[in-house]
Image (cartoon, grey):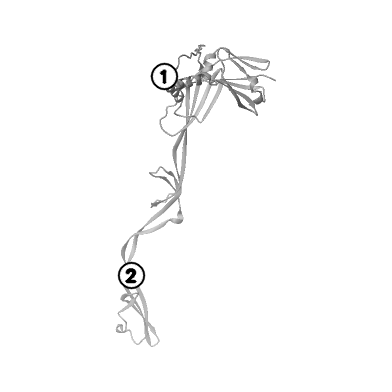
Amino acid sequence: MKRIIFFTAVLIVYVVNAVFSISEIFIPDNVMNYEQDGKHYIIKAYTLPPGEVELESEFEQDGYKYTKENTDEEEIYRVENKDVEQSETDNSQEQLEYSDEDGYSGVLTIDNSKTTSKVKGYKAETYTVSDTQYFYNLPSRDLYTIPKSVSKDGVTLSFSTINWIEAGSGYTAKVTYSGTKSRQVPTGYTKTYIYSGTVTKAELESITYIVTYVGELIPIPYNPVPLVVGGSLGSGFAGLFLFFLFKKNTKIYNMQNGNYLLIGKTNVKTLSPTINLAKYKHKITTNVYRIVLSKSLANKLFEHEITISYDNEALKHTVRSCESDYTFDITIGG
């Protein structure tokens, strides 16, 4: 009983590892296959975040080993905009280069409608205030009749000069008065200019890698492995064994409305590999088929023929690859 459990566990671990070991770290966005000058090429396109990446350098597919030939990179940036204003003192150039710690940069233009002036400071200044007054019908040129001072704009002005004018039997006196007054005057002005505009920031968002692989055919000899069932290993192990023994190893597709539609699965024997399409008559609409052999079956039939029949017609096809599932197209039947 312990041996049964042991062999069952080993088989389960083997199957699980086989399934999950094929996963890839990076999944390509697009894959293209083509042939040129007799060589097989595969191009894979990846879009990945910035940073160091290690893409697969080689892999095997459809009987070919593909090796990385070259890699092209294209950086994709995300662009953000914002409107800014910046003030400059005593700088009246038309444009100004802008950059900030957030990574935005651009050119700002002066907005003359927002230019302002501000007084730098003040100083005291003394100036002369003067006034002229006339005194009429004076009987004589007597200075004692003339006021020695007058007031103007809050400033007391002192007698300065006098001019006597004869007027009939008397005199008119033209008197000038003068004085000084102090006032505050600006020492200068500071002008502030406003610059405005839209600036941008470009951040690396992702990198697109275009990887080209060139393939080389892998020759694998035909080496069928016989299946032997012996002993009583218990229902659990026997169930797993029978699953692998009788599971369908071939898929059959029929061309319908421009696409290949899966119409059936079958288990092809390696000793006499034959596919009878007649049993799928109720699902067939055209005479164009695609046959997909499992990797295990392709390995056993490598460089051997498989027969495809439909009623009284039969075709043979030689399996040319066994590295992965093997696919080929045929046309048979009316």
Give the camera-side residue of 21 and 249: 249
In the rendered image, the quadrant that contains the N terminus is top left
Q: Is residue 201 inside the magenta stretch?
A: no
For discs 2 and 1, the disc positioned in front in the rendered view: 1
Residue positioned 34% across, 72% down in the render: 129
Q: Earlier in the sequence, mark 2 or mark 1?
A: 1
Q: Nearer the viewer, residue 43 or 153?
A: 43
Residue wearing tag 2: 128
Q: Is residue 6 in the magenta section?
A: yes
Could you tell me residue 111's position as x and y percent? Answer: 45, 53
- The magenta segment is 4-8
- In the image, is 20 to the left or to the right of 276? left
Q: What secondary structure is marked by label 1?
A: helix
- Mark on residue 234? none
> Could you tell me residue 290's position as x and y percent?
60, 22
Q: Residues within 10 Å of mark 2 (few under 14, many from 20)?
A: few
Q: Give the quadrant of residue 120.
A: bottom left
Is residue 253 something that shows in the picture? Answer: yes
Q: Is residue 67 visible?
A: no
Q: Which residue is mark 1?
A: 4
- 68, 168: nearer the viewer: 68
